[in-house]
Amino acid sequence: MPRICVSRPKDEWRRLWNEKKIELIEGNAWQNKVRSDGVWSGKLKNPGKRYFLTLAAKAVRRVNAQRDKNGLNYARKAMIRCGLSLDVDGKWRVEQLFSHLQEIIRKYPDEFTGKHVGSASLSGEGDASTRPPSSSSSITEAVV
């Protein structure tokens, strides 16, 4: 599963939405509104919030109905790969994570095991590595 967790449901959502757009075009479901410059907008009618919520649920159901060779559905497999769940044998292992997360753990093994974790001071004391980032500091300062 090399793709990020949202890509498969998103791909399925796009496919279903494209089918609906073709249906709207074939049914001449245009907004038929004139813009301020006097030209027709050419937009399709908006099917509404209920349609899009139903579409999202349908896309997720379709993706979760698919199974891999071990019988896992997509949601379960995505949770395992992101480290949010135990593996199929009931154990959690670093190897079940995406490769980029495994690389971070290999790069910082002591931090992963909790050996060099400093206590964060909420009073602003301590060095920058143990102090929570201030609202004015950049994301890169907080990560580094």
Image (cartoon, rainbow, N blue to C red):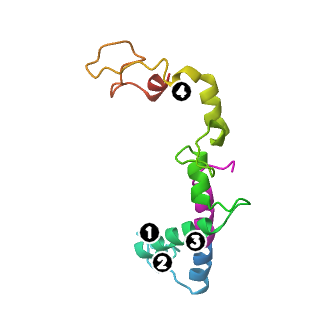
CA gap, disc 4 and disc 3? 42 Å
In the rendered image, the vertical position of residue 132 relative to residue 19, given as above or below: above
Q: Depth-wise, is mark 2 or mark 4 nearer the camera?
A: 4
Magenta-drawn segment:
1-16
Residue at x-position 62% and y-position 69%: 65
Q: Which residue is mark 1?
A: 37
Which residue is nearer to you in this view: 32 or 53? 53
Q: Which residue is mark 2?
A: 45
Residue 3 colored in magenta in the image = yes
CA gap, disc 2 and disc 1? 20 Å
Circles 1 and 3 in contact, beta carbons < 8 Å = no
Disc 1 marks a residue whose amino acid type is Asp
Q: Which residue is mark 3?
A: 17
CA gap, disc 1 and disc 4? 60 Å
Disc 2 marks a residue whose amino acid type is Lys
In the rendered image, the vertical position of residue 70 relative to residue 25, given as above or below: above
